[in-house]
C-alpha cells in the first residue's frame, strides 16, 4: 500500500518536471487500482519546503511582456503563460490535499484527480509549445500564482475561496472568448486544447464550491457571506474584475448572490 502524503512529499522535492508529471499520474493510477492509503500519521511540512524548478525565471506580473495573439511570438508567450498556470495548478492541487488533514477520503480523491488532470493540461500545452520549438522555461513566467497558496497555508476556507473559487474561476470567465479568438484565426489545435481544459476546469471549480460549502456547514458559517469575507481578506486590490461568466460559474457551484456581489 502506498501513501498519498508520501507521494506528495516526493512531488515537492527538487526532482525534474518529467519526474513530477510521472509521480502525479502514478499516484492517480495507484488510487484507481485501489492501492493508495489516505492515512495521515506524519507531520505536515511547512509550505516553504515546497520547491520549484530553476526555470522559468519568475517575474512580477507588471514586468511580464505584453502579448498579441496575432503574432507568432505573441502566441508563443501566451501558451508559455498557460503552461505555467497549468504547472502551478498541479502544485496547488497537491498542496490542498497535503496541507489540510482530517477531511473525508473523497476530498483527497477529488484533488488527486485534479492534480492528474492539471498534469495532463500541462503536457498538452507543452506539446503545443514544442511544435513551435519552445520549451517550458524558455520564457519568464508570472510569480504571483503560488502566493495565494502561501497566504492561505493555514486556512482551508481561504484556500478554497482563493484558488478554485477565484483563480481557477477566472479561467471560466476568460477562456470562452480566447477559444473564439483562435477559432477566428483558424487555429484548430489551440481551440481543441483550450476546449478540453475548459471542460475540466468547470469541474475543478465545482469541486472547490462543493468543499467550500461542506466546510462552511461543518463550521457553522453562512457560505455566501463567508465567501465575500474571504475574498475581501485575501484578494489584493479588493476583488477580481469581471466580466464574469454567470452560466459557467453557476454550473461550477456559484450562487447568483455571489456573482452579483462580484459584479457590484
Ligand atoms: Fe488546468
Ligand atoms: Fe484546474
Image (cartoon, rainbow, N blue to C red):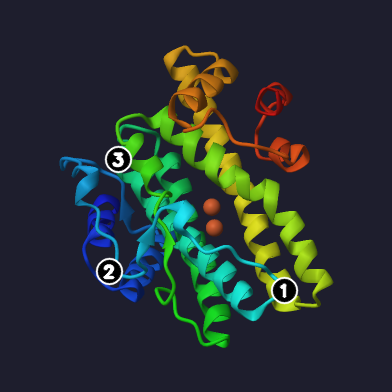
Return the residue found at the far left: 42
Judge: label 3 CB < 8 Å from ligand 2. no
> On residue 99, which mark appears?
3
- Residue found at x 38% / y 49%: 146
Q: What residue is disc 1 on?
A: 70
Give whichever of 133, 124 is nearer the camera: 133
Secondary element type, mark 1 = loop
Report, in whole angstroms, how far the alpha carbon at label 2 lies from the one at label 3.
24 Å
Q: Position of residue 188 (x, y in %)?
A: 76, 77
Secondary element type, mark 3 = helix
Report, in whole angstroms, how far the alpha carbon at label 3 lies from the one at label 1.
42 Å
Q: Position of residue 53 (x, y in %)?
A: 29, 67
For marks 2 and 3, the one nearer the N-term is: 2
Residue 27 in sight here: no
Ligand 1 is found in the corner quadrant, namely bottom right
Q: What residue is disc 2 on?
A: 54
Q: Nearer the viewer, mark 2 or mark 3?
A: 2
- Residue found at x 34% / y 36%: 151
Is 70 rendered above or below residue 245?
below
- Residue found at x 66% / y 40%: 252
**For the N terminus, which image quadrant?**
bottom left
Q: Nearer the viewer, mark 3 or mark 1?
A: 1
> On residue 222, which mark appears?
none
Q: Position of residue 42 (x, y in %)?
A: 16, 43
Q: Is residue 75 left or right of residue 113?
A: right
CB contact under 8 Å: marks 2 and 3: no
Is 4 rendered above or below residue 222?
below
Report, in whole angstroms, how far the alpha carbon at label 1 lies from the one at label 2.
30 Å
For marks 1 and 2, the one nearer the N-term is: 2
Amino acid at each position: 500500500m502506498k501513501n498519498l502524503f508520501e507521494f506528495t512529499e516526493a512531488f515537492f522535492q527538487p526532482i525534474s518536471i518529467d519526474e513530477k508529471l510521472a509521480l502525479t499520474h502514478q499516484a492517480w493510477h495507484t488510487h484507481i487500482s485501489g492501492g493508495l492509503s489516505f492515512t495521515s500519521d506524519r507531520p505536515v511540512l511547512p509550505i516553504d519546503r515546497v520547491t520549484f524548478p530553476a526555470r522559468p525565471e519568475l517575474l512580477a506580473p507588471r514586468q511580464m511582456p505584453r502579448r498579441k495573439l496575432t503574432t507568432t511570438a505573441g502566441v508563443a508567450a501566451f501558451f508559455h503563460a498557460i503552461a505555467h498556470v497549468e504547472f502551478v495548478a498541479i502544485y496547488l492541487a497537491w498542496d490542498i490535499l497535503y496541507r489540510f488533514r482530517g477531511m473525508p477520503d473523497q476530498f483527497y480523491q477529488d484533488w488527486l484527480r485534479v492534480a492528474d488532470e492539471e498534469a495532463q493540461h500541462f503536457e498538452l500545452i507543452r506539446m503545443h509549445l514544442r511544435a513551435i520549438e519552445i520549451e517550458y522555461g524558455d520564457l519568464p513566467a508570472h510569480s504571483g500564482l503560488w502566493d495565494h497558496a502561501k497566504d492561505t497555508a493555514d486556512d482551508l476556507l481561504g484556500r478554497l475561496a482563493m484558488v478554485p473559487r477565484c483563480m481557477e474561476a477566472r479561467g471560466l470567465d476568460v477562456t470562452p472568448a480566447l477559444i473564439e479568438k483562435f477559432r477566428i484565426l483558424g487555429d484548430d489545435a489551440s481551440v481543441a486544447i483550450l476546449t478540453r481544459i475548459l471542460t475540466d476546469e468547470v469541474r475543478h471549480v465545482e469541486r472547490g464550491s462543493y468543499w467550500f460549502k461542506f466546510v462552511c456547514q461543518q463550521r457553522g458559517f453562512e457560505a455566501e457571506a463567508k465567501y465575500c469575507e474571504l475574498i475581501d481578506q485575501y484578494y489584493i486590490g479588493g476583488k477580481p474584475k469581471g466580466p464574469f461568466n454567470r452560466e459557467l460559474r453557476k454550473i461550477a457551484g456559484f450562487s447568483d448572490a455571489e456573482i452579483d456581489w462580484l459584479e457590484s
